[in-house]
Amino acid sequence: MRAGADDKSGRLAIIAGGGMLPHYLASAARKNGENPLIVQLSDENGPVWQGFDVEYASVGNFAGIGRLFATHGVSRVVLSGSVRRRPAALQPRPSIQSGRLPLAS
């Protein structure tokens, strides 16, 4: 077991792609005492998230998703569900704050 695997400090976020799997995961997490933040990928069809805290983001918006995690106290993340559309080459928006800068060719 890796260090921190059983550590439940911080909030759980579920980055939700398409389909019902993210909803099943969120419901199971809630039954286990979690209050997951749902980050629904804006280009994917997902279930209605009634009763959950939901934010929307595009798959390539790393900095925006990072800000959501900081705002909501997220320290654990799961990606669940299908992602049918890959982001365009220019869609990912890295930022200096995130430390993810594109490499020069």
Image: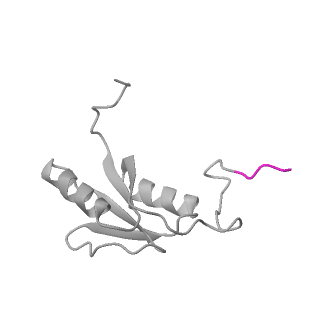
Residue 99 x/y as whole percent: 65, 47
Colour setup of the view: one colour
Residues 84 and 79: in front is 84
In the displayed structure image, the side of residue 100 where residue 9 appears, left or right: left
Q: Residue at x 26, y 72 (%)?
A: 49
What number of labels is visible?
Answer: 0
Residue 16 x/y as whole percent: 38, 62
> Which image quarter: residue 50?
bottom left
Could you tell me if residue 72 is visible in this image? no
Q: Which residues are magenta?
A: 101-105
Q: Is residue 37 magenta?
A: no
Answer above or below: position of 3 versus 46: above
Answer above or below: position of 102 versus 39: above
Residues 68 and 42: in front is 42
Could you tell me if residue 99 is visible in this image? yes
Answer above or below: position of 2 versus 63: above
> Which image quarter: residue 87?
bottom right
Residue 59 x/y as whole percent: 53, 64
**Magenta span: helix, strand or loop, mainly?**
loop
Residues 17 and 29: in front is 17
Q: Quadrant of the N terminus?
A: top left
Residue 20 x/y as whole percent: 29, 66
In the displayed structure image, the side of residue 27 where residue 3 appears, left or right: right
Q: Residue at x 49, y 60 (%)?
A: 65
Q: Residue at x 38, y 69 (%)?
A: 55
Q: Is residue 104 magenta?
A: yes
